[in-house]
Image (spheres, grey):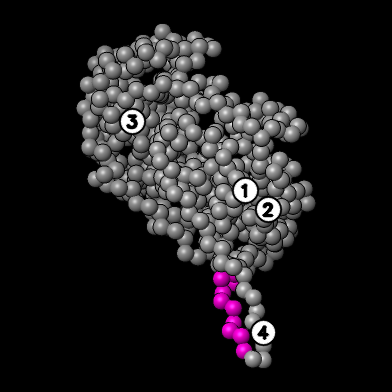
Amino acid sequence: MIIKLRTFVRATVVSVVVALLLSVSLPATSVSAKPQWQLLKLKNGMDIIVIENRSVPLVTVEVAVKNGAYTEPPEYNGLSHLYEHMFFKSNEKSKAEGYHDRASELGMLSNAQTQYEVVNYYTTTINYGLREALVLMSDALRYPLFDKQELDQEIQVVIDELNQHRSNPFHYLFEATDARLWYKYPSRKRPGGDPETVAKATPEMMHVIQKKFYIPNNSALVVAGDVSAQEVFKLATEIFGDWARGEDPFIKDPIPRHPPLTKDEAVIVNQPVNAATIQISWHGPSTDLDAPATYAADVFSFILRQPDSKFSRALVDSGLTTGAGLGYLTQKNVGPIQFTAQTTPEKLKDALKAINEELAKFDSDAYYSDEELTNAKTLLDVDEIYDREKPSQYAHTLSFWWASSGLDYFAGYGENLNKTTREDIKQYVRKYIKHKPRVVAVLISDADQKRIGLNEKDLLARLDPVGAAAAAETKPAPKATPKSTTRKGAASKKPITKSKPKP
């Protein structure tokens, strides 16, 4: 299974809580409660993370590996995804002992996800199946066979999955955007992979991935549910403790940083759709280079997504779009910022004009109220705390943060959200969005494009050219002459880069 985007809106219960809290003025004090987990690092470097929650007699055992799209050069693009499909197939122990029958008896429900910066495998079972679940994960990690017949079958399954995505018109919008946004290393932002590359995969290539990434010092074990942390630590030490440490894969082969965009890019994607979808994408902050901006990004996006925000009123309540939102995906290696809106072909050009006007206001003091800022921080906190109520889901959350930011970042997430100020948001907007190069894409049918007379040049013309306003702000004033007065120029507004926080 491929995971491309984080979910910003959770269960209905959260929506109800949000609605109730928005109906009152929230206090400025934080409701944040630090995440509760216990951590042990084995001598071989493997992190063991335990969340005790005895609300139901179930336990989720999850293994996270720092692998996925960001580790893939073109010749390996999609093989992390293929490896995920092979994980629960035959291994040296299961083929010899047939313990998958025992897994069925315990009702183990297993699945996996391939993401940008992590691949996670998990199984949920009744609490007395803890040992068997840990053994199953250990054997799958350490003793894969990559049987040729099974591999060939899964290659076809993955290719069929990728081809299925091509039946969705939005696939072509995302593909066209990503090709321009990540122009130098597109394979490192494509978790599904390239079908042609997947088709050429061999058992030997799978073993290369195993030896490089599937090592204890590049993995975490997350156990959540009706368990005792001390029991988990004891079992994990017994079962995983003799797994040999490997060479750090990111020292020998550092992940290349995506170079910044140098200019605006525009693309029109024709698909048989009735509506028009607008997507504007920027390079956002990375957790290892500008962590403070990631908190500002989350808070600002949340403010804009609320139905009573000036942003929503201008674009949705006005009738120009049927929906509009701004989101940021937290990542270690350049998280994307994306604005998305849908409208009718007839309103597309007017919508682009209105979007441009809203983007220009993002760093204005009057664009949102102090109450909206306080509410956003509090409700994000509530959302994160609510996420802990379901241990099986919370295990996935911890896997994501462990890989993309580290647990220290996540442990202080609520606290740092509540420290976010207007100035932080201004700096974030000016550093990553306003007057910054972006990719502007429109998904529209060929007939509608021709009918309204839209082309890529016209698409960019309806948005402020990148750098134009900034250049005007910093352009030196003309020298005074005896016959004229000196025009006063605007002050230079260079974005302030905050220092990287100490871990």
Residue 365's disc number: 2
Q: Which residue is mark 4?
A: 485
Q: Amino acid at mark 1?
A: Arg
Image x and y of residue 289, in percent: 42, 48
Q: Are marks 2 and 3 in contact (CB under 8 Å)?
A: no
Q: Quadrant of residue 467?
A: bottom right
Q: Looking at the picture, tell me which residue is in the foreground, 8 or 319.
A: 8
The answer to whether 13 is drawn above or below residue 312 in the figure is: above
Q: Which residue is mark 3?
A: 219
> Which mark's residue is nearer the viewer, 3 or 4?
4
The rendered magenta stretch, by its main secondary structure, is classed as loop
Label 1: few (<14), some or many (≥20) within 10 Å?
A: some
Q: Is residue 145 left or right of residue 319?
A: left
**Which span of residues is magenta-colored?**
471-481
SS of the residue under disc 2: loop
Image x and y of residue 243, in percent: 23, 24
Q: Looking at the picture, tell me which residue is in the foreground, 479 or 76.
A: 479
SS of the residue under disc 1: helix
Q: Which residue is mark 1?
A: 422
Q: Amino acid at mark 4?
A: Thr
Q: Is residue 148 magenta?
A: no
Q: Looking at the picture, tell me which residue is in the foreground, 370 or 358.
A: 370
Q: Quick one: which residue is furthest to the right in this view?
A: 318
Q: Amino acid at mark 2?
A: Asp
Q: Earlier in the sequence, mark 3 or mark 4?
A: 3
Residue 73's disc number: none
The residue that appears at 29% across and 43% down in the rendered structure is 250
Q: Are marks 3 and 4 in contact (CB under 8 Å)?
A: no
